Amino acid sequence: MDILPILSTLRRHKLTSWLLILEIALTCAIVCNAVFLIGQRLQRMDMPSGVAEHELLQIQVADVTTPSNPYARLAEDVAVLRQVPGVISVASSNQVPFGSSSSNGNIRLDPAQPERTLFATTYFGENLVPTLGTRLVSGRDLQSDDFVDVETAMKGLGNGDSKSLPHVTLITQTLAERLWPGQNPLGRIIYLTPVVGLRVVGVVDSLVRPNAYDTAKAQYTMVVPLRMGASKDQSYLIRTRPEDRANVLAAALAALKKADPQRVVTTQRSFDEVRRKFFQDDRAMAGMLVGVIAALLTVTALGIVGLASFWVAQRRRTIGVRRALGATRGNILHYFQTENFVLATFGIALGMVLAYGINLFLMSHYELPRLPGVYFPVGAVLLWLIGQVAVLGPALRAAAVPPVVATRSV
Amino acid sequence: MFAYYLELAIRSLRRSPGLTALMVLTIAFGVAASMTTYSVFRAVSGDPIPWKSAKLFVPQIDNWGPNGRGSDGEPPNAMDYNDAITLMRDHRAKLQSAMYQISPSIVPADASKHPINVSGHAVYSEFFPMLDVPFLYGSGWSADDDTQRAAVVVISSKLNQKLFGGSNSVGKTVNIEGKDYRVVGVLNDWNPQPRFFDVVNSGGFSTGVEDVFLPFQRAITVGIPNDGNTNCNAVPTESGFVGLQHSACVWIAYMAELDDTAAATAYKQYLDGYAHDLQQSGHFGWAPNNRLRDLPHWLDNQHVVPSDTKVSLLVALGLLLACLVNTAGLLLAKFLRRSSEIGVRRALGAPRLAIYAQFLTEASIIGLAGGVLGLMLTGVGVVSVGWVLPKDIAALARVDFSLLTLTLLVAVIATTLAGLYPTFRASRVQPAWQLKSN
């Protein structure tokens, strides 16, 4: 099909053509960026936690009156939970992966260095590795004689007695690689304060922080052998089989209530819910963008249908003449399809430039990364397809114009 | 004359119902999408206390020094206990209050019922007049109650409903954490969004209602712990809630009312003087680095409006723009085809102005129809926002009268603008030339 006659026709409808090109360009630019934003969100929502999420439950309880010995109370609760049928493992923790609320510390590699090396999250709790199901890649797990009561540790910190402080820690592979790239982290010391130096005894595969807002720092995690007492900020973590979760949760709550009817359960959920809640904003944003893209593509398609129908109606006589001069239905059909293709190509070319500009703007204002090149061909193909689908109806109608029209006066 | 144009317009639109419907739909679509997003945006960026926000200030004191600052040199966004108490004691603002988040248990009088866990804040008496908190019954407590650490409480109407069946409970007692408190006031519905008085702990938004308010010093004395965030630059040397009070950890929100610029300047000088004294006495090894922001600037500084909302607003505006370009294209095609009609009218003596009037009437009818349909779609959109957005933000998105007016206005103005160029072209048509051909 010859493109030159199409171009010369379009030149006679300059403004309308330009508006259509502009619309395709706008759509292309917005769709490219929106698809990219959705991709970003989905990628974030896929962030690995390093724990057996489908097998875990979280329970938090609040006591009306503070128990006289919170450590004994915690041990009792853990013992009670272990007795519940279906429970594989129980741990207590000051925080949970993707739980938002977190405890963090500035860590240093040299106690004298003025600036922190980085800001890592600290898990305090017993039995965390087997319960969470994170894999130990080297070294050993924390043992019960590593653990120190938080009260004792605080006293030790006050009077400078380093014996009553924890001495060892577990860290993630990512943190180890960040602190000592390419070296063996076992036996190295991390300083939480100038006096609290923790020797790395084990490295776990992966354990995400509760406040994983920045993907790059999501795995800056340490597990410190501090024993916390029972309090409403402590979480009981229960590992069970995925299919038993609902039953085990109900039984565990009943067992805790039976141990002390006065207390209030403040949190009871599976880790699927924890993850869902943590990423709900990302999901919402992705949903909204999908809606906008659908709306935008629909509007563009309708616009193309409208304008193409209009042109077909306007050119009925010309079409009739062409048909009378021997053009086949296929020729007419192809004419309109090619015309649309040409317009779409112009629009897409302009849209790419615009998409890049929008991305630059978003990058400077909203800390977004650069738009990868792969989104450009995806956007282009999408718009070409939409254009071809939209123009098909009017083009078929044009092809149906009988040659006899040429003989009629207007 | 207008009635005549109206009739002409309707007749012309009826001639091509498909195209008309398309234009109306496009406008409606664009308007609905951008307005839905706008309503969410406005809900989350709205000024929670517009009549007073310029007079409310949040002081920040740099008690951590250069090591604790972020890369932007900002001091901590909350206060440690010592600074908050000193500022309260010096009492330099017209009204002020330190506050921290609490989550105590309430033990019902009926022993068969389970205790309930509520959330609230420990505040000073000036909190209530400073934030114009509305009361259903009673009032806040007095400055004397503050100093005497009185066992008094202000409860929400929701909690009042739960505990006292909604009756006037002033003077009755509530058992909080095992101790009796006298109810001095019951709040009317009060759920400001963003939760501006304690942005640091609520992240700005909260679906929960503040159920209890206790005197600050009372809560400290009986040891009701902080339920909000605690940020430490160094590990506290003592454990527990008392240890927290002796530490440089920050966990207390602070707000002060300062009526004019002079008062704000004086207060800033006072803060710097305070930090300077601490530097002189050797407590701070650094020069004063304080901040005093009014509420709107504070909310902006704390990024209370999620950047998601801003990006999606941009996307929605882009959608509106695409719809307008689309409508302009369709209108252009439609109007340009009517050159002969214009030629006849001009030849018969119609001035350019009359042509403008006629075509703009037609364009604005499309705009109006699109706007009205868009309005209905916006309603649907705002309702369905609840499916995709987190509940705490979606709950705030509402269609209200000003949004309604704005929707209609945007639709009509946008379509009229879109119709302007075609009309300009149409009215330029040379009558003689048009009459000659065909």
Image: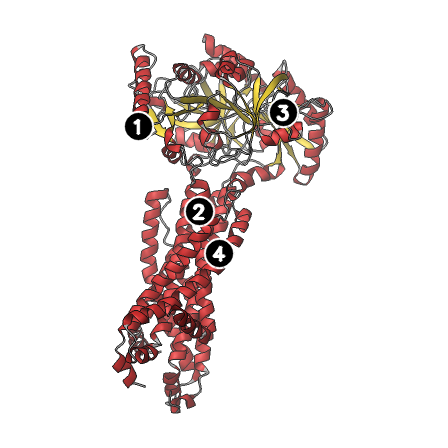
Question: In the figure, is residue A372 to the left or right of A11?
Answer: right
**In the picture, residue B13 is in which quadrant?**
bottom left
Residue B342, image x, y percentages: 32, 77
- Tell me if I can see residue B419 in this picture: yes
Q: What's the amino acid at mark 4?
A: Leu
Discs 2, 4: same chain: no
Amino acid type of the residue that numbered disc 1 sits on in the rendered structure: Thr
Q: Chain of mark 3?
A: B
Q: Residue at x 32, y 71 (%)?
A: B354
Q: In the rendered structure, which disc, 1 or 4, sits on the residue that comes first in sequence?
A: 1
- Depth check: give the residue in front, B1 or B350: B1
User: Which mark, residue B375?
Assistant: 4
- Would residue A35 be seen by someone viewing this image from the given angle? no
Secondary structure, mark 1, is helix
Q: Which residue is mark 3?
A: B169
Q: The numbered mark 2 sits on a residue in which chain?
A: A
Residue B66: % across, % down: 32, 22
Q: In this rendering, is residue A288 above or below A156?
A: below
Tell me whether circle 3 and circle 4 mark residues in contact (CB < 8 Å): no
SS at mark 3? loop
Is B335 placed left or right of A91 in the picture?
Answer: left
Q: Nearer the viewer, mark 3 or mark 2?
A: 3
Chain that bears disc 1: B
Q: CA distance from mark 3 to mark 2?
A: 52 Å
Return the residue found at the far bottom: A407
Report which residue position mark 2 lands on: A40
